[in-house]
Image: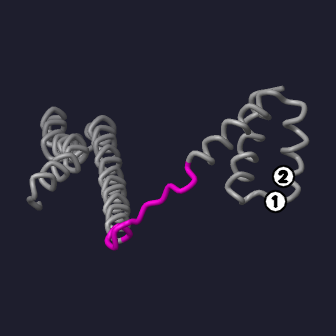
Amino acid sequence: MSGERHEDFEQRIDRSLAGAGTAEEQRLVEEHVRSCSACAEYLSASRRAVAGLKGFSFEAGPGLNARVMAAVKARAEEIEARRRWMRLSVVALALTVLGTFVDLQVGRWAAAFFGLPSVAVHHGLLALWIVPSFGLLVLFPLLPLLAAKRSREGRTI
């Protein structure tokens, strides 16, 4: 029997022992374990594990739910902040590529139109467009790391 089919029956066994399986699933499990020793062993081991947990209980403190939800919310905000920075990084990359294209393609035409040496136009575009956008391209991925470090230290940006 394939491992995939065993995994399917193991999930059905788990649902059945948890009381979440349907009557049809219960019947299929019982029928299957009669002919499959691996699944029969899994069912036996699972039953022993469940029996070992009988009488085991714990109480969660009253603030547990609030703390868990606060942690989930903080994690979701952190993920969204990283996505924002990633989008900004993509924009900075696009500006860098566009600036390079403009410098290479349009720089010669602009130099001829304004009667300037093409080297001067290339240097101007390099200084005013490519270098700043490249700086942003490098800086944007670092900002979330710096913000996370500062928040661990208890400071805000």
Q: Where is residue 99 in the image (x, y as percent from the top left)?
A: 28, 43
* Prevalent SS, magenta region: loop
Mark 1 — residue? 22
Residue occupying the far front of the picture: 55
Q: Where is residue 54 in the image (x, y as percent from the top left)?
A: 57, 53
Identity, as a three-letter code, of the amino acid under mark 1: Thr
Does the image show residue 1?
yes
- Residue at position x 38%, y 69% in the image: 65
Identity, as a three-letter code, of the amino acid under mark 2: Gln
Residue nearest the viewer, comparing 139 with 120:
139
Image vertical order of residue 55 relative to residue 125, above or below: below
Gap in angstroms between the C-alphas marked 2 and 1: 6 Å
- Residue at position x 74%, y 31% in the image: 41
Does the image show residue 106?
no
Location of the N terminus (image quadrant): top right
Mark 2 — residue? 26
SS for dot 2: helix
Q: Position of residue 150 (x, y in %)?
A: 12, 53
Question: What range is drawn magenta here?
Answer: 53-65
Lateral position of residue 151 relative to residue 86, left or right: left
